[in-house]
Amino acid sequence: MSIIIYTTPTCSFCRKAKQYFRERRIHFTEYNVAADRRRADEMVRKSKQMGVPVIDIHGKIIVGFNQPEIEKALRR
């Protein structure tokens, strides 16, 4: 399963999302959109949002740390 998390260094919900995946030993790829404009543009194209975190779970886009939606997407 492919999981991408678009984050910024100061985002507390980004830290919570990463902690959630780490605690469950679920591999993810993180992109810091504050430092990578190309990834920031990619995030906005996918989510139509500027806020972080944006989590892409195998094509399912979740904006924010929405644990019920994350769990639902992981069950797919």
Image: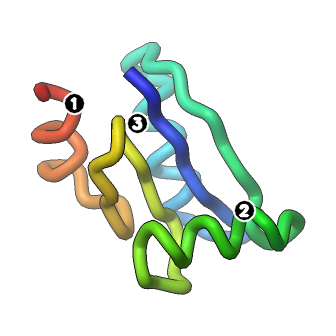
Which numbered tag is attached to residue 62?
A: none
Tell me which amino acid carries mark 3: Tyr
Q: Assign a secondary structure to mark 1.
A: helix
Q: Residues within 10 Å of mark 3 (few under 14, many from 20)?
A: some
Q: Nearer the viewer, residue 57 or 27?
A: 57
Residue 31 left/right relative to 15: right
Q: Which residue is mark 3?
A: 20
Residue at 66%, 43% (x, y): give it.
30
Residue 46 left/right relative to 67: right
Q: Position of residue 39 (x, y in %)?
A: 72, 62
Quadrant of the rendering where the N terminus is positioned: top left
Residue 32 left/right relative to 35: left
Tell me which amino acid carries mark 2: Arg
16 up-or-down from 23: above or below: below
Distance between mark 2 and mark 1 Cα atoms? 23 Å
Q: Assign a secondary structure to mark 2.
A: helix
Q: Which residue is mark 2?
A: 39
Residue at 42%, 83% (x, y): give it.
48
Q: Assign a secondary structure to mark 3.
A: helix
Q: Position of residue 38 (x, y in %)?
A: 79, 66
For residue 57, which quarter of the picture?
top left
Q: Position of residue 7 (x, y in %)?
A: 64, 61
Distance between mark 1 and mark 3 Cα atoms? 12 Å
Tell me which amino acid carries mark 1: Leu
Which numbered tag is attached to residue 74?
A: 1
Q: Position of residue 63 (x, y in %)?
A: 36, 68
